[in-house]
Image (cartoon, rainbow, N blue to C red):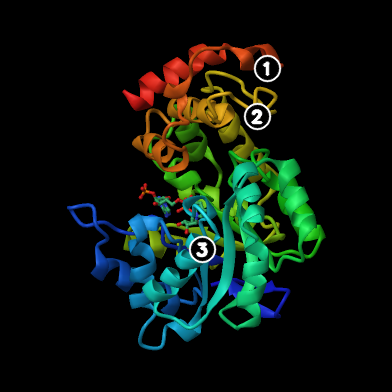
Amino acid sequence: MLYRKFNKTGQDVSLLGMGTMRLPLAEDGSIDEATAIEMIHHSIDQGINYVDTAYMYHKGKSEELVGKALKDGYREKVLLADKMPVWLAKDEEKMKEIFETQFERLDVDCIDMYLVHSVDGPIWRRAQKFNLMDFLYEKQAEGKIKHIGFSFHGDLDLFKEVIDMYDWDFCQIQLNYMDKEFQAGVEGLKYAASKGIPVIIMEPLKGGKLTDKLPASVKELWDNAPVKRTPAEWGLRWVANHPEVMCILSGMSNPEQLAENLRIMDQAQPNSLTEEELAIIDKASAEYNKLIQYSCTECRYCMPCPKKIDIPDNISYYNEWFLYDGNPKVKADFFTFTIEGRRASACVACKACEEKCPQHLPIAEIMAKTADLFEK
Ligand SMILES: NC(=O)c1ccc[n+]([C@@H]2O[C@H](COP(=O)([O-])OP(=O)(O)OC[C@H]3O[C@@H](n4cnc5c(N)ncnc54)[C@H](OP(=O)(O)O)[C@@H]3O)[C@@H](O)[C@H]2O)c1
């Protein structure tokens, strides 16, 4: 396992981190506990020292599972990360209750890495309204949490604003070769690093959408590349190639994926991909992008929507459906990451957004198609 420095403490952090949002499942859809615990133990035995969970993963069962897996001496070997889902709290009291519940589920005295979960505009405003940062500093002073960070799903401007607002210990962004300019993107990665803030990566394989149901043109590129690598290896190597990345979380859903990713992270040195290899990855990304249906640039001029629909997000899921060949993960993500009542089906075709869209997209029509595709 390769390690990169956590500059705040001088600690070595494993390049591969254990994400626990996509744990192996039993037939009834619950976590396959024995396999999941075995995988977490194996990952730590093989040198992984970062384990990431969250309040809502696996409907609250991920935290419990991680708590169980970290018994018998494993807790001391890892940095444990958990997050505050402020959108689930109706007020400050509920937020504090969630925090207590996390400790009960995990059965630990301290969480090493604590994040404001999934920051975007509305979530960041809510976090401020509930004085979340004051609460976290208080808990840090009490020794309940060690390092304070945030995970991010908003746009680049907001990312820079949030980075500049507090003396963060670390942050977490989505990054893969399809999302170079999406959300924080590569520019955000470099911005955080320029301020000395370590960056953890999530969704390095776009939640698995870069590893299965490959378009024929992408498969051909990988097949004809001078070095033979699996799609997972191309994806992970691209992320690891950035020296600014401290740790890459992958939500591995079986022992084979864990074994492969452990092997990859033994070799993925920063700046180790050749110009030729990077060009092949760029071509793969371009091939995927040819499948995009509507070229929304996510400028967000269309917002706010009177029905509170996140229009760019909905368009993005619609596009992803075609990009990743109707991969059921796109539909699952749509329901996980959009809010009920604010999805495409809430559109009343007032077209206020269309007047503002610099790309002149037929947004009402796209919302109807998105609703048909996912919500019917
Ligand atoms: N804070 C946040 O807002 C937030 C958001 C997202 C994620 N996260 C965290 O970040 C972690 C990583 O994100 P992620 O789970 O989306 O990571 P990811 O690596 O992009 O996606 C994981 C999926 O990729 C596929 N995969 C992984 N390794 C593979 C391999 N060697 N070969 C083939 N397929 C492979 C598997 O999909 P299949 O087996 O299904 O094909 C797996 O379930 C999460 O687990 C979670 O802990 C946080």
Indicate whether 336 appears above or below 350.
below
Q: Quadrant of residue 289?
A: top right
Indicate whether 117 appears above or below 276.
below
Task: Report the residue at 67% width, 54% height from top.
Answer: 128
The reply to whether residue 65 is in sight is yes
> Residue at label 1?
357
Q: Quadrant of residue 168?
A: bottom right
> Residue at label 2?
298
Quote the CA–CA distance across marks 1 and 2. Answer: 10 Å
Q: Residue 358 in the image: x percent, y percent?
A: 71, 16
> Which quarter shows the C terminus?
top left
Can you name the residue that lies furthest to the left here?
27
Quote the CA–CA distance across marks 3 and 1. Answer: 40 Å
Q: Amino acid at mark 2?
A: Glu
> Residue at label 3?
93
Q: Residue 131 in the image: x percent, y percent?
A: 65, 60
Q: Amino acid at mark 3?
A: Glu
In-front residue for pair 178/183: 183
Q: Earlier in the sequence, mark 1 or mark 2?
A: 2
- Is disc 2 placed on a helix, strand or loop? loop
Residues under numbered marks 2 and 3 in contact, where contact means CB atoms less than 8 Å apart? no
| Disc 1 versus disc 2: nearer the observer | 1
Q: Residue 251 in the image: x percent, y percent?
A: 43, 57
Task: Report the residue at 51% width, 63% height from top.
Answer: 93
Q: Residue 366 in the image: x percent, y percent?
A: 50, 16
Q: Amino acid at mark 1?
A: Cys
Task: Report the residue at 58% width, 38% height from top.
Answer: 178
| Disc 2 versus disc 3: nearer the observer | 3
